[in-house]
Amino acid sequence: MKIAVKPQFVLSLLALPLLLAGAIGCNKAQPQQQPGGMRALPVQTITVAATPVAQTDEYVATIKSRRSATINPQVDGNLTRILVHSGDHVTAGQLLMQIDPAKQEATLASQAATEQQKLAVYQYNQLQVERQRKLFAAGIISKDALDQAEQAYANSKADYDSSSASRQEQDRELAYYRIAAPFDGIVGDIPVHIGDYVSATTMLTTVDERKDLEAYIYIPTERAAQVRNGLGVQILDNTGNPVETTSVDFVSPQVDDQLQGILVKAPVRSPLLRNEQLVKARVIWGMSPRPTVPVLAVTRLGGQAFVYLAQDAGGGHFVAHQQAISLGDTLGNNYAVLAGLNNGDKVIISGTQILMNGMPVMPLPPGPPPAAPPGAGS
């Protein structure tokens, strides 16, 4: 038995799935249709605007202490005592080491005895000249006899004064056999040992104070016209993060003939810095307006940095345009752009991994601002 099916019924059944699909999709946002049939990719963009960016250069700097001393003896002899260890904290005048003073003590004792002898002769001649003056006044002795007594007195006084000065000199030299700390600080390496013979060229140790530190920076002569007191300086750690911000307070009036640089100094106070430490110093020459872009918006190809711009193609349509740029310093999560962008450019910041030059895009409107955390503005 055959059942007759009308052609209009068959067409209605075939069209039903298409009608259902259209009904389901009518409420969904569809990518914008571009001329030529390619759908536009929805992308987030930011509008480039110039912001103040620091103009900087980085140099290698040396941290030095204004109170750093290399301890050398001022006399020769054998070390008999070492009273400190490397790393000890010492105070001004504290005894560090002692050199055998026996020979100098004997010399001092001999000089002191000579001084006493000269003093006795001086005191005797002093009494004699007083007697001779009285006798001369009474007319008992001649003027010649008085002159001889005056001369003997003057000679003995000069001998005594000379001997006293020599004894004081030997006494001061004896003090050099006791090596003391010149100021409060920390003892460095001690390369000598008890019994070693030391002289004025022997380095006994160092004493450094972690105060009054300065960064020594040599600026190339090409920057001579810009070097001045008050320039901002950032001391950086090994990862490039600032350790301390300071400013130049000394500019050398002359150029170093070996480095061909101008020495500038900047005070530092961070406890992380030590004497003779090498660090990076970022000198801030000034501020100037520069475009900035997010780090994630930048792509690289063959060492060249690029961003994608949402370029107006007319008729309300946009295409991705690959733009080469020159990057400056990193500012948080952004790059400063030295060349390649202008104020008002729309930089694409999403979907950059799948973008191609000339690809249709649809800039999305900016999203709502993030909600304030509870309690904000109270």
Image (cartoon, rainbow, N blue to C red):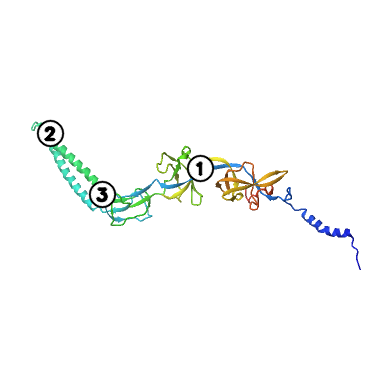
Instruction: Choose mark 3 or mark 2, whichever is in front.
Output: 3
Q: Which residue is mark 1?
A: 284
Q: Which residue occupies the foreground of this view, 353 or 242?
A: 353
202 or 167, which is in the foreground?
Answer: 202
The residue indicated by pointer 3 is 174
**Mark 3 / mark 2, whichever is N-terminal:** 2
Q: Residues within 10 Å of mark 1 (few under 14, many from 20)?
A: some
Q: Which of marks 2 and 1 precedes in the sequence?
A: 2
Q: Nearer the viewer, mark 1 or mark 2?
A: 1
Of the two numbered discs 3 and 1 on the same chain, state the one appearing first in sequence: 3
Instruction: Read off the residue under disc 2.
Output: 147
Q: What is the C-alpha distance between the residues marked 3 and 1? A: 53 Å
From the viewer's side, name the closer residue of 34 and 83: 34
Is residue 289 visible in the rendered image? The answer is: yes
User: Is residue 110 found left or right of 37 in the rendered image?
Assistant: left
Q: Residue at x 10, y 34 (%)?
A: 145
Q: Label 2 neighbourhood size at 10 Å, few (<14), some (14-19), many (20+)? A: some
Q: Is residue 23 left or right of residue 113?
A: right
Q: Quadrant of the N terminus?
A: bottom right
Q: Is residue 336 left or right of residue 250?
A: right
Tally of marks: 3
